[in-house]
Amino acid sequence: MLSDLLARLEEKDRLALARLLTLISRGEQLPEISSAIGTRNETTPVVAITGNAGVGKSTLVGKLAEYLRGEDKSVAILACDPESPLTGGALLGDRIRMPSRPDDAGLFIRSLAAASGHQAVAEHVDLMIRLLAKFGFDVILLETVGAGQGDTAVRELADVVVLLVQPESGDELQWEKAGLLEVADVVVVHKADLAGAEKTEGQVKELLSLPGSREIAVLRVSSRTGQGFEALWEAVMAAPRRGTTLDGRQLLRLAQQLLADRYRSRGAAAGPIIDRWKAHQLDESQAAEQLLDLLVR
Ligand SMILES: Nc1nc2c(ncn2[C@@H]2O[C@H](COP(=O)(O)OP(=O)(O)O)[C@@H](O)[C@H]2O)c(=O)[nH]1
Ligand SMILES: [Mg+2]
């Protein structure tokens, strides 16, 4: 029963939390869960870690969680990467020494099925974030699949977006500049234990020094040596947070989410409208208006 799960959530029942996340990931009972959770608790920072495959997102997320646990902060991780070593069984002990025992109540990890299409994050992550924030985690970390341009969706979800690049990324940087640097609040030259990290840091700073650029922190971090995590967290906390005030864009996003939720529950009734549109009996704006009528009624 949903009401039962929600009541257990209040008691910090992790099993209930896990079940609710599963319901959300399956797209079940979204409107009910959404209205029970309400709007996001704005005090919990949501930090997205993005960047190309292989740049070390999963590794860094694990190490960052480890650092934050050391600071006595509870951490929830959403990994939009089904092959994330954070959750990949054997790999967990192998590639990453996870922060803590599996029974650590201050750490929660959920990996999500591959995001569809060009999305950098799985579906319904917004609601999952609201749920985790309500549960009371101090920090929420979001590992994206690193789908390039799809990362703009991440910008909507996260308060702070951390972009990872590797030393000697060379030409890639040009591409990153076009798309991802627009998204990033903090740029990490990851794998700083490798040669060329300093040079790449310089290149990124140069790219960012163009007139009109936003203020973006650039720093070197190595998950291998542990270098730079304190500075990274400082930069994350210093970055202007996006989600702290409910601006118009967020309200629109909420309305959009509500509409999508309702469409899921009342979708059947929308069928005839769509059919008439397909048969050219309605034009696009007429059909859209009728759909809206149906959904907001
Ligand atoms: N040299 C070095 N290698 C790293 C570091 N962090 C991760 N790696 C390696 O980079 C590879 C990709 O890491 P992963 O976390 O799976 O990257 P993701 O695809 O971005 O999630 C793995 O082989 C890691 O061992 C680092 O700080 N230094
Ligand atoms: Mg990964």
Image: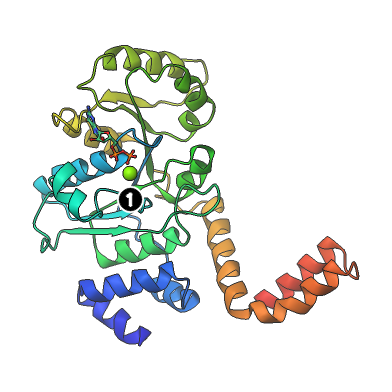
| Residue 103 x/y as whole percent | 10, 64
| Residue 40 x/y as whole percent | 39, 61
Name above or below for residue 203 compared with residue 3: above
Element at label 1: loop
Q: Quadrant of residue 207?
A: top left
Locate the N terminus and report the quarter of the image it occupies. Answer: bottom left
Q: Residue at x 25, y 54 (%)?
A: 88
Camera-nearest residue between 218 and 49: 49
Drawn side of residue 213 relative to residue 264, left or right = left
Q: Do we see residue 38 in this rendering? A: no
Residue type, label 1:
Glu
Q: Residues within 10 Å of mark 1 (few under 14, many from 20)?
A: some
For ligand 1, which image quadrant applies? top left
| Residue 50 x/y as whole percent | 39, 39
Q: Residue at x 90, y 66 (%)?
A: 280
| Residue 256 x/y as whole percent | 59, 62
Q: Residue at x 34, y 66 (%)?
A: 131
Drawn side of residue 214 relative to residue 22, left or right = right
Name above or below for residue 186 compared with residue 63: above
Q: Quadrant of residue 82?
A: bottom left
Determine whether the beta carbon of the residue marked 1 sits less than 8 angstroms from the nearest atom of ligand 2: yes
Locate the C terminus and report the quarter of the image it occupies. Answer: bottom right
Q: Do we see residue 176 in this rendering? A: yes
Drawn side of residue 88 relative to residue 283, left or right = left
Q: How is the image coloured?
A: rainbow
Furthest residue in direction front, as rendered: 90
Count up the numbered dots. 1
Residue that carries the numbered disc 1 in the rendered image: 83
Q: Residue at x 81, y 73 (%)?
A: 275
Camera-nearest residue between 191 and 243: 191
Q: Quadrant of residue 193?
A: top left
